[in-house]
Image: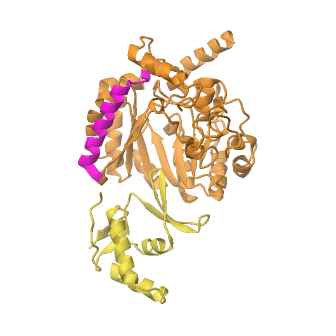
Amino acid sequence: MSETLLPKKEWIPTIHSHFRLQWEETQQAYVLLYPEGMIKLNFSGGEILSRCNGKSTIQTIIEDLQHQFPDAHNIEQDVLEFLSIAFGKQWLTTYD
Amino acid sequence: MKTAPFWLLAELTYRCPLQCPYCSNPIEIAQINNELDTETWFRVMREARQLGAVQLGFSGGEPLVREDLPELVAEGRRLGYYTNLITSGVGMTADKVANLKAAGLDHIQVSFQASSAELNNFFAGSDKAFAQKIAMAKEIKRHGYPMVLNFVLHRQNVDQVAQILDLSMELQADYVELANTQYYGWAFHNRQQLLPTREQLQKAEAVVAQYREKFGARRKIIFVVPDYYETRPKRCMNGWGNIFLTITPDGTALPCHSARQLPFEFPNVRHHNIGYIWRDSPGFNQFRGNEWMREPCRSCPEKEKDFGGCRCQAFMLTGDAANTDPVCDKSPLHHTITEVIDKAYIGDATPLLFRNMQNSKNLIASDHISS
């Protein structure tokens, strides 16, 4: 249904104003909140979205994650794939 | 059983400037008037949040009549809730829309009665309601809120679903809820005048499908089916005491907004904390799990799917809240539903009874005389 957007690494993603991202202590997870609903994010989804702050480029986000999780493989590809889904679901918008 | 509520619905007041005859509030609104104060609401919000509640709805009645609404919103947001205001839009002003935004309100849901001023205002019981709602919907969008428009559907407006969706698209609603009337409270009293025919519903669903195809993911259209026309009951509240916690204006805590009518004791937040209410109170444990079930639910392979349906509907239609919801065609009392449907084809000339304090008083008085 949603259009597939291939994110470019110079984009600066930010959470769409119709969603709110927050850390939920009781669930030990990041959640996306929207009118009358919630999406609980898995660990990597939460780590990625919490860096989409309207200031960092996707390139910076990837480097930051590579720095923090040096043992993880294919971070770049995983991030781009996840962001593509997140843009498609309109969780994210971008300034570029 | 979940250990935490997900939803806290704060019914701040039963006062309301409108008189919708399908209101889900209890008939007895006129005798429930000792509203909780601001501090008690703060405590309720804090305790529910500590348990893990995330969504906070301000509802009523009309929540805008509470002068402390901006304070309540600000506290809810400070605690980390996603804050939803569920309003008729009547009593809203451009300033209030802005002030609530500043207080941290996340989302506003505006109810409409119909797509035309005439029918809208008839059902609302107010000549000015429609124009006010249109003006406020525009104001809400101007401030960048995500906006849900809610239309309660019944036999007198369900044929206008196309016009309703056109109006919603024009107002740039992000979500449109087409909520077929659920027959509780005032709606139950008026159900014979409100229940549409099956053919009306099928046409409406076809229109919804066309609009969904046309607008795709940009606008979400939610169509809440009326369970009277189903053969299996709804998964009511996603299970009793599972995710939903309602606090009524006088502080009674309920597992759903209709449960007050059930013959069980429900706790009051004036006397108990939310942790006790949610986890330990007899009222919230009454129908948890499936030990309470009788036949045909007990041996039914679908019992985990719908939990036997709605306890309030079972009570209203069969006289016993532990019975199978008679919407289920396995229920030996399913005829209590089909008889109402059959009458929908004949029509009912009885005038609608509007939801207001005077009618509430009259009904309470006549009930006392007859019983």
Query: Which x, y percent locates residue B200?
Result: 33, 27
- The image quarter containing residue B346 is top left
The residue closer to the viewer here, B288 or B221, is B288
- From where the camera sits, is residue B268 visible? no
Query: Which x, y percent locates residue B124?
Result: 41, 26
Colour yellow belongs to chain? A
Q: Quadrant of the C terminus of chain B?
A: top right
Query: Which x, y percent locates residue A27?
Result: 59, 64
* Residue at 69% in and 48% down: B278
Q: Is residue B128 left or right of residue A43?
A: left
Which residues are drawn in magenta?
Answer: B194-216
- From where the camera sits, is residue B123 visible? yes
Q: Colour of chain B?
A: orange
* Residue at 48% in and 48% down: B84
Q: Is residue B180 left or right of residue B243?
A: left
The residue closer to the viewer here, A83 or A73, is A73
* Residue at 29% in and 57% down: A1
Relative to B70, residue B334 above or below: above
- Is residue B209 located in the magenta-colored stretch of the structure? yes
The residue closer to the viewer here, B138 or B303, is B303
Which is the main secondary structure of the residues drawn in magenta?
A: helix
- Is residue B215 located in the magenta-colored stretch of the structure? yes
- The image quarter containing residue B117 is top left
Relative to B342, residue A41 above or below: below
Query: Which x, y percent locates residue B293?
Result: 67, 38
